[in-house]
Each structure stands twice: as C-alpha cells, then as structure tokens.
Image (spheres, rainbow, N blue to C red):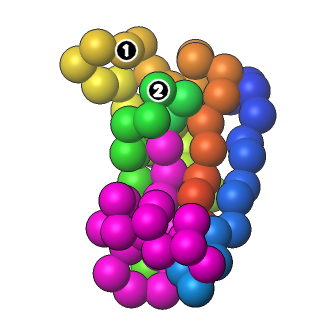
Amino acid sequence: MQGELQVIRLDVNSPAGRELGARWRAVFTPTFILFDRAGRELWRGARPPTPDAVRAALEKPSSNQQGVAQAGFWMIIVVA
C-alpha cells in the first residue's frame, strides 16, 4: 500500500460535529468511518478498525475503481 492516511477526530458536541455526525449517520459514539479519496464510505464500526480490516477495505475494488490502495490517499473520520 502507498499513500497517506489522514485521521480526523470530530467532536459531536460542536456545531460542525453535530452537522457532520448527522450527515454521516453517526448514531453512536465513537463511530469510526473509513472513506476513500472520492468520499465513498469503505468501512464503519463502533471500535477502531484492525489493520486487517483497513487493508481489506482498501484493497477491495468497487465498481468504478481499481482499488483504493492504488488511489494513493484515504481518510478515516473518527466521530467521538
């Protein structure tokens, strides 16, 4: 794998946190969401993803991409 992983911690008590938490349907805290660089959700869970879960999500090709790992950038949003 190559590229960069950006982790953002979002406070659901802030105005931006409430707005984005609602948009991403973050019902429970914490909620961990893995996105590809195009903003498509690849993985979601109530606990931090294991390295194997991240690897599997990044290597799983979708209908319109060759695989996220090849895209070079992905992001995890942590809503807590």
Q: Is residue 11 above or below residue 51?
A: below
Give the quadrant of the C terminus: bottom right
Q: Residue at x 69, y 68 (%)?
A: 9
Disc 1 residue type (three-letter): Gln
Residue 50's place in the image compared with 3, above or below, is: below
Task: Give the residue type at disc 2.
Answer: Ala
Camera sees residue 19: yes
Closer-to-camera residue (51/65): 65
Q: Nearer the viewer, residue 47 or 33?
A: 33
Which picture quadrant has residue 62? top left
**Above or below, 80 relative to 54:** below
Q: What distance separates the C-alpha of mark 2 from that of mark 1?
A: 10 Å
Question: Mark 2 against mark 1, which lies toward the viewer?
Answer: 2
- Provide the secondary structure element on which disc 2 rests: loop
Q: Which residues are magenta?
A: 14-35
Classed neighbour count for the residue bearing mark 1: other residues with Cα under 10 Å, few (<14), some (14–19), many (≥20): few
The image shows residue 68 at horizontal and vertical percentages of: 50, 26
9 and 45: which is toward the camera: 9
Residue pushed farthest left?
Answer: 63
Q: Which mark is residue 38?
A: 2
Left or right position of 3 against 42: right
Q: Which residue is mark 1?
A: 65
Residue at image position (60%, 53%) is 76
Mark 2 Cα-neighbour bin, 10 Å: few <14, some 14–19, many ≥20: few
| Res. 47 in view | no
Tell me, yes or no, whether the highlighted magenta stretch contains residue 15.
yes
